[in-house]
Amino acid sequence: MPIQRVFLDWSQPGLPAAVDFLIRRFASHRQLDLSRVIVVFPGRRAARRALEILVQRASRQWPALIPPRMVTFQQFPELLYRQQRQLADDLTQLLVWKQAISCIPPRELQAALPQIPAADAVPAWQALCETLRRQHNELAAEGMEFDDVHLALEQAGNSREADRWRALRRIQAEYLVRMDDLGLWDRQAARLIAVQQHECTTQDDIILTGTVDMNRIVRQMLDQVADRVTTLIHAPESESAAFDEYGCLNPAAWQLRPLNIPIEITRVADTPADQARAVMTEIRTHGFQFRPDEISVGIANESLVPTVLQNLSDAGLTGHWSVGQPIGATRPGRLLRAVADYLASARDGLPPDFPSLTSLVRHPDLDPWIQRAVDRTAGRTAGRTACADWLTELDQYLADHLQTVPGALAGAAPRRRIIQAICDSVDQLLHQMVEPPQPVRPAAPLKRRRSPASRPAAAKAIQRQLPLDDQADAAEQSDAAELSATNLAALRRPLRDWVDGCFRMLNAAYRDRELHDENPSDRGIVACLEAIRETALTLRRVPDAIMPRCSAAHAIQMLLREISTANVPPRTSENDIDLLGWLELPLDDSPFLILTGFNEGFVPESVVSDVFLPNSLRTRLGLTDNSRRYARDAYAVSVLLHSRRRVTFIAGRRDAQHNPLAPSRLWFAADPQSLPRRVREFYDADSQHNRPGTDGEPAGADSTTADLDRTDQTPRQPSRLSGFTVPRPPLIPESPHEISVTAFRDYIQCPYRYYLRRELRLRAVEDRVRELTAPAFGSLMHEVLNRFGLSAVRNAT
């Protein structure tokens, strides 16, 4: 029995129509039991939104509603076969790829990898292995191996590239053998074996929703359970020829299709800031007809997200970017990166340098740690007033002495002791990374609470959950006890030990900090600690045979790269305006959409160069190429034009670096008679149409955008005052009776800055000095000559 195709008219949004289909098909008079239904979506947001719509529409009539299992397309294949071995996680796969490359003689890899990274260059190895894993996964998803690419290139007469893929095939074969030796399965290989051995089966009904593109392996898996599969196609049945039997797009049917995007709903702005202002103009002009949760802003170019969010905030609105903040951009993530840079600056047997130290100690979360150390030093020397601003003392020391690396310190005793205390405090923090592991009792799972008082306990609970070895090598314990943190860069340890050490170091830095769940920065701290804990747990499961030994700097770089795929989700509110990626828009159900970044390279997405699989080779092999991407994006535009009450497309002429941008090819998929006008609209900056809104306001104008009041839905002018308060400086005891001409010039330019510079005599201290300043050089010469004049050789001839 073939897969059943069901067409949902695209005159309405796709998700509500899909939910209505589920209710019609599975509802009875007494209940709506969907427990034996699997609904597959392209992404997580569509799955969450579909569940919300289902509950809203069905919970009143069927209070005992049992929802279906809603999964993403990445999770779905593992529901169709029984896993006979444990699937290797991503980090384990990377380490096995590295081991496979390392054990092959370099001469056999010359054609593919003429320059193999050094043994301790962990980040370079990680980047190389990620590239190989990506190529392996993509080809395996299409039922191919590296050898298939090699044969295709040989048949095409490209012997040089064929030799390269033969060498890559050698690596892939070694990778699969070593995975088998470890008793692990590669995910894509497991799916391929399940298809080959006809292991795919299910007793559930499978509903595919919005899956307009899928790889060959998934299609073959669906063939084995076709009698249980229904694919929902968001298009009228008159478009059936544009879709295949799986509900996927026929690329040829979309290549020459006229989309005829109306010029009247298209805006052309100059810079990213102008695009963001055009978004606000559209909301001000038409947004009063909709609630905030009925408005979506599509982001085809993700670099526009910060600018759009800032403009929404300035207008008194709240934007919600579901991607959130990357873990690597959280405060602990930036602290780890600063520590890695500090340790990496140690070369040729010297300790880490002062420039990297000044960058590290400027991290705001280290201020309490360093301040306590400086205060203890000041207390011992009875000079507490000297440590009130330790950072200024450090910058002044570097400006005066131009010292490159810590060591023997120069200058007067008070400042010298402060600098030594700063260096010692950093050493004490880094020493947390090499403390001997101690046995830890297992703890209950971490509970997330909203109470501010629970946040320090949350961090400690994370620390208790981290499983450390009950016994450590005695020699390493001894070395760690005597190790100076300035020599930490030369130490080589297993990767898992460094990750455990990073966790201990961050807990030491944040253990006294009160964390509030309402603060996005504090949520980032907890999320980063949890991500590192998960990585530590993963490394506990990695066999010792593939565990690399590396330096602390390389380990931190690898850790940051590993956790960078995770994000800190932002808090949501019913008054938020959603910012959505391009691929999320076809299944979004907001009636008002504003799409930004409608430019070539983003919509449609194009990949013009690939180090391993260029577009021409992808087409030959049947992989995802630019023609399939074009078809996907042309279909998405068609859905948006038919299913939304209002949609606006905004294109930019230049990016943030002022490089010119091209209009999207999809905009020119129109009546040939309209093409000259479309060209003029994009490239003519004075075009009358580039004035979005009904009032003719230019896209680049500084428009004060109206907020949306949920009660009366009337525009409200928000305040545009900055939240920054200029500090009031302290008063001087006596006003000046006369000032110089240059000082009077400063006063005319800015009285505030005049007061700071001329009356309070504030000065900037530069820490990134490359040479001595004139006063410092003069002081040095005076000191040299003074010591010479007091020495015994002053009369030497």
Image (cartoon, grey):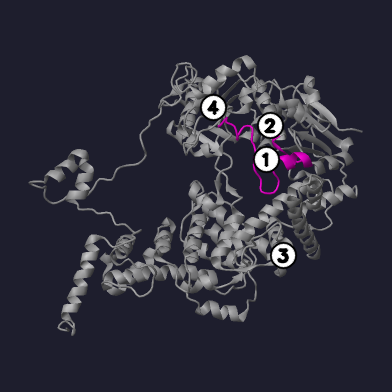
Which residue corresponds to mark 3?
107
Question: How many residues crowd around disc 1 within 10 Å: few (fewer than 14), some, or many (20 or more)?
Answer: some
Marks 3 and 4 sit apart, C-alpha to C-alpha, by 53 Å
The image quadrant where one finds the C terminus is bottom left
236 up-or-down from 3: above or below = above
Q: What residue type is labelled 2?
A: Tyr
Q: Which amino acid does label 3 sit on?
A: Arg
Which residue corresponds to mark 1?
44
Which residue corresponds to mark 2?
630
3 vs 4, front mark: 3
In the image, 53 versus 729, the foreground residue is: 729
Q: Earlier in the sequence, mark 4 or mark 1?
A: 1
Q: Which amino acid does label 4 sit on?
A: Ile
Residue 650, numbered circle: 4
Marks 3 and 1 sit apart, C-alpha to C-alpha, by 45 Å
Marks 4 and 1 sit apart, C-alpha to C-alpha, by 26 Å
